[in-house]
Image (cartoon, rainbow, N blue to C red):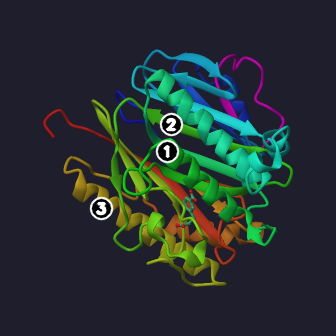
């Protein structure tokens, strides 16, 4: 997916990735887990995400390109690569590592809590030090996302820690927050977070069909998930819309419980509403169901054919999708779709 003069996103097989040019690569997310990408990636940061790939090849590489000269670096455990205007970064933290050595009083309520706070603290420190203060898009993967420990679901523990970390760094918790996804990874994986940040703030887009996630009532956890439904990045020649993980939620309720096909259709209706809202907010935007790169998270691998059939029906030619097995943050959700949409900006727009 390519809009001239700006950010670019490709989903590649291992073979395609090996033969692809690397000069303008900003960062990579590799699905699923080991083996690590072939040597030669050199200093390009690669987030290794342990979510099995469904359909197609065993590994998929999500490759972000900048169309600008880039430079790599590392700060503590954050690996990054940055262009003039954008920074891609990633961090992986084993939960044992984050809690280790800390007295119980400082380790927080759980090892996952400690790892999440640490990851977000390091990300914030990196962005502040390098001058890319605006998080645009964050991807979070944590093992056993639906499991309870000490009576609290791990996704809820993560939400509390993420909110507290953002609060501690003086960020707002509503409105100006990044687009995000938060999914389960295979048991035993580290907490893995990767992100895109910018010199300039994006526009923040909410979905008229959904309550903002940061306003969810407490039935979904003591601390709401802090993310925007989408963020919109304006570059010189292009617009990029980062669409958060989107599910069969209307208002704040999960709907079509138990019906995978209906959940998929509702999710696509939510994405269509978000595209329409982005086109309304940004007059120059022409986002459509034909300009999407989708990452589809499937709870039960056997559902993938049904889900793909709905996407094929709904998406216009020009959109692409990859399918990953992942647990979704609410037990009653069977599918979640995140997407990136791009469109060129005409000089006269
Ligand atoms: C939802 O709409 C579904 O916690 O970062 C989607 C995207 C979801 C991001 C997050 C959670 C997150 O609430 C779940």
Helix, strand or loop at disc 1? Answer: strand
Determine whether label 3 and label 1 are within 8 Å by CB: no
Q: Which mark is residue 196?
A: 2
- Front in this rendered view, residue 10 or 280: 280
N-terminal of the two: label 3 or label 2? 2
Mark 1 vs mark 2, CA separation in Å: 5 Å
Residue occupying the point 66% across, 40% down: 119
Residue occupying the point 63% across, 53% down: 161
Circle 3 sits on which residue? 277
- Image quadrant containing the C terminus: top left
Q: Which mark is residue 293?
A: none
Q: Give the range drawn in magenta.
A: 33-47
N-terminal of the two: label 3 or label 1? 1
Determine whether label 1 and label 2 are within 8 Å by CB: yes
| Residue 196 point in image, percent of width and height | 50, 37
| Residue 210 point in image, percent of width and height | 41, 72
Our reading of the magenta stretch's main secondary structure is loop
| Residue 89 point in image, percent of width and height | 59, 31
- Mark 3 or mark 1, whichever is nearer to me: 1
Mark 3 vs mark 2, CA separation in Å: 22 Å
Circle 1 sits on which residue? 137
Residue occupying the point 75% across, 39% down: 93
């Amino acid at each position: 997916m390519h809009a001239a003069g700006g950010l670019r996103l490709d989903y590649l097989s291992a073979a395609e990735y090996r033969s692809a040019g690397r000069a303008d690569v900003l960062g990579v997310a590799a699905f699923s887990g080991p083996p690590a990408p072939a040597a030669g990636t050199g200093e390009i940061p690669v987030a290794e995400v342990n979510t099995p790939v469904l359909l197609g090849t065993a590994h998929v590489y999500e490759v972000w390109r900048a169309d600008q000269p880039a430079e790599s670096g590392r700060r503590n455990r954050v690996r990054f690569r940055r262009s003039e205007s954008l920074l891609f970064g990633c961090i992986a933290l084993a939960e044992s590592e984050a809690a280790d050595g800390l007295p119980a009083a400082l380790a927080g309520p759980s090892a996952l809590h400690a790892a999440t706070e640490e990851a977000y603290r390091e990300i914030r420190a990196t962005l502040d030090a390098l001058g890319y203060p605006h998080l645009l898009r964050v991807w979070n993967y944590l093992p056993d996302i639906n499991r309870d420990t000490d009576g609290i679901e791990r996704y809820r523990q993560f939400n509390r820690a993420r909110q507290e970390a953002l609060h501690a760094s003086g960020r707002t918790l509503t409105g100006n927050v990044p687009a995000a996804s938060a999914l389960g990874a295979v048991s035993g994986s580290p907490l893995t977070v990767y992100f895109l940040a910018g010199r300039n703030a994006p526009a923040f887009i909410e979905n008229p069909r959904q309550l903002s996630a940061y306003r969810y009532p407490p039935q979904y956890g003591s601390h709401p998930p802090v993310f925007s439904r989408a963020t919109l990045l304006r570059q010189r020649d292009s617009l990029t819309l980062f669409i958060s993980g989107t599910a069969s939620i209307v208002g704040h309720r999960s709907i079509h419980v138990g019906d995978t096909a209906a959940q998929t259709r509702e999710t696509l209706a939510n994405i269509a509403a978000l595209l329409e809202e982005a086109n309304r907010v940004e007059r120059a935007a022409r986002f459509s169901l034909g300009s999407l790169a989708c990452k589809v998270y499937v709870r039960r691998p056997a559902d993938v054919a049904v889900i793909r059939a709905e996407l094929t029906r709904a998406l216009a030619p020009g959109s692409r999708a990859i399918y990953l097995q992942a647990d979704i943050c609410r037990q009653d959700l069977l599918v979640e779709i995140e997407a990136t949409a791009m469109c060129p900006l005409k000089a006269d727009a």
